[in-house]
Amino acid sequence: MTDETQPTDPQATQPPSGEPISRRSDGGGRTDFQPNPSINFSARVGRPTEDEQLLASPSAKRRIIGDLATDFTHTDPWRVLRIQGEFVAGFDALAQVGPAVTVFGSARTSEADPYYTQAIATGRLLAERGFAIITGGGPGIMEAANRGAREGGGRSIGCNIELPHEQGTNPYVDLSVNFRYFFVRKTMFMKYAEGFIIFPGGFGTLDELFEALTLIQTGKVRNFPLILFGTAYWGGLLDWIRGPMLAEGKVSPGDLDLFMLTDDPAEAAEIISAYHERNKDTIVSTALRD
C-alpha cells in the first residue's frame, strides 16, 4: 500500500529520506523540509481532507465526493474506526516520551524574526532541563522550537496534520507523528505535555490558546502552566480580556490567573520546571492509576 493508491495509516515515522521539498511562500524560514507522503495524498490528488469529509453534512458530502458518499469506507461508522486507529497510533508513539512541553506559534515566522531566535533558546533551555519539545512539525516557530530541542540534546517531536496543500516536516524533528484529524492531534498536544508555551501566531495558534484556557478553566486539566511569549504581541488581546470581557462578566477575575506572560526564554523554562517539580508526584501517581 503506497500513497499513490491511498493514504497510509497514521503512524510515527522518522523524517523520510529523499530530496527536500519547498515550503509555501508564506514568510521566511527554511526550505529544506522533508517530504511527508502520508499526509500529502489529498493535496496531490485534489481530494478533500479527512477532516473536511468528517465535518461535511450528508448533502455536502455528496457534493464533495459524489458517488463515493455511499461507499462504506466513506461513511461515518467506518470513519469512527479510522479515528480510533489514529488515537491508538498516537498513544503508542508518544507514551514513552517522558516530560514534554508543547510549543505553538506561527508557521510564517522567518529565521530573521526575533521570536524565531527566542523560540530556539526556549526549546534549548527546556531540553537541557530534561523536557522533550512537541510542536506541529512545520516551519516558523515550530521549526525553531524543534531546533532548540535538538541543540539542547532533548527529544524533538512533530505532530503534523493533513492539510489541503502539500507540506513537509521540518528538518529538526526526530520523531514525526502524522494525523488526519485535528481533534486527535490536539489531544496529543495536551495529553503528553506538562505545559504550553504560545508564541505569536494566527488563527491556529489562537485556537490552541483558547482551547487550552477552556480546559484549564473547566478543570479538565490541572497544574498546567500556559505561557504567552511576547508581551507586545499579546498585549492587545489581554487588554480586551481584562477590559470588556471582565467588565461584562464574561470571565471571572480568577480566570486572568490561568496564563502567564513573558519575553524571557529563561523565565519560561523556569516556570515550566517549577510547575513540574511541584506536581511531579501527582503526575506519577496519576500515571500509575491510568
Image (spheres, grey):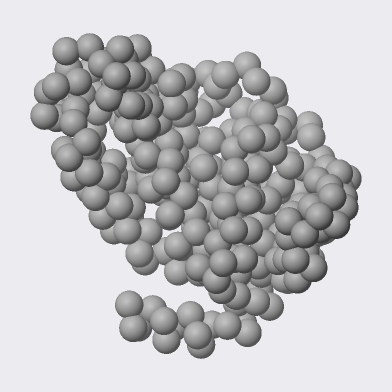
The image quadrant that residue 115 belongs to is top right
Residue 237 placed where, x, y %? 81, 46
Q: Residue at x 67, y 62 (%)?
A: 226
Residue 216 placed where, x, y %? 59, 66
Above or below residue 41? Residue 93 is below
Q: Residue at x 49, y 54 (%)?
A: 189
Is residue 130 in view from this perspective? no
Which one is nearer the viewer's eye here, 207 or 278? 207
The image quadrant that residue 68 belongs to is top left
Which one is nearer the viewer's eye here, 191 or 74? 74
Above or below residue 89? Residue 191 is below
Q: Which residue lies furthest to the front in this view?
A: 248
Relative placement, left or right, of 237 versus 201 is: right
Residue 96 placed where, x, y %? 37, 66
Residue 281 placed where, x, y %? 51, 87
Which one is nearer the viewer's eye here, 122 or 288? 288
